Image (tube, helix red, strand yellow):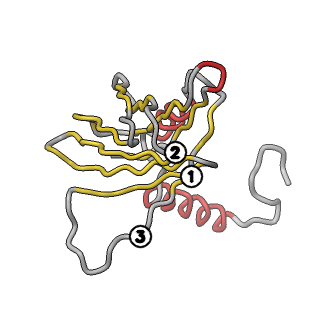
Amino acid sequence: MNEGSTFPDDTFPDDRALLAELGRVVDDIDAPPDDLVARIQFALALEDLDVEVAQWERSGELAGVRSTDQDTVTFTVRDLTVMINLTKIGKSYRIDGWLVPAGQYEVEVRVAGHDSSSTIADDVGRFVLHEVPRGTTQIVVHVGVDSSRRTVVTPAVVL
């Protein structure tokens, strides 16, 4: 193989043209999203790198039910479950959430390109975040206090 070439020496010129065309077609049909780099930077830009990442436990869509402007997503990590209900209201979302086990934990919503907002879950673990803008979004839950405080973050989802 020639140095710097991605093709073996025995590749015919027609093969090179075919491979180049195939590469162009793949880029046209399945190109990475324009904001892929921004999404990755957003997901990695947590101030506190000592976080636990929750797993997405979303169940499949309900068969036979018409689409609505609501969706429920559940995230779990070790001993905490975060369930959120997303309701589209105009150009933004309302997030109703529940934490199990319940506790008065700080809940923060991060949306790429916007300021974060936060609230405190009530004593039964319920929280509401109003007017959450569309975009790449993460929920951050601060569990415990002082030295026993830990941070749980959900995977980034696009609203």
Secondary structure of the residue carrying tag 3 is loop
Q: Amino acid at mark 1?
A: Gln
Give the labeled residue for mark 2: 155
**Distance in Å between CA atoms under marks 3 and 1:** 15 Å
Which residue is found at the position 41% from the left and 30% from the top?
A: 108
Q: Quick one: label 1, few (<14), some, or many (20+) residues within 10 Å?
A: some
**Distance in Å between CA atoms under marks 3 and 2:** 17 Å
Q: Residue furthest front?
A: 123
119, above or below 154, in the image: above
39, above or below 14, in the image: above
Which residue is found at the position 16% from the left and 45% from the top?
A: 89
146, 37: nearer the viewer: 146
Give the labeled residue for mark 1: 55
Query: From the viewer's perspective, is 126 left or right of 69?
Result: right
Task: Report x, y in % for residue 66.
Answer: 20, 72
Q: Amino acid at mark 3?
A: Gly
Secondary structure of the residue carrying tag 1 is strand
Q: Considering only order in the chain, which callout, 1 or 2, is on the residue closer to the N terminus? A: 1
Task: Report x, y in % for residue 95.
Answer: 30, 43
Q: Quick one: label 3, few (<14), some, or many (20+) residues within 10 Å?
A: few
Which residue is found at the position 32% from the left and 74% from the top?
A: 62
22, 118: nearer the viewer: 118
Q: Considering only order in the chain, which callout, 1 or 3, is on the residue closer to the N terminus? A: 1
Q: Considering only order in the chain, which callout, 2 or 3, is on the residue closer to the N terminus? A: 3
In the rendering, which numbered label is found on residue 60?
A: 3
Which residue is found at the position 66% from the left and 67% from the top?
A: 15
In the rendering, which numbered label is found on residue 146?
A: none
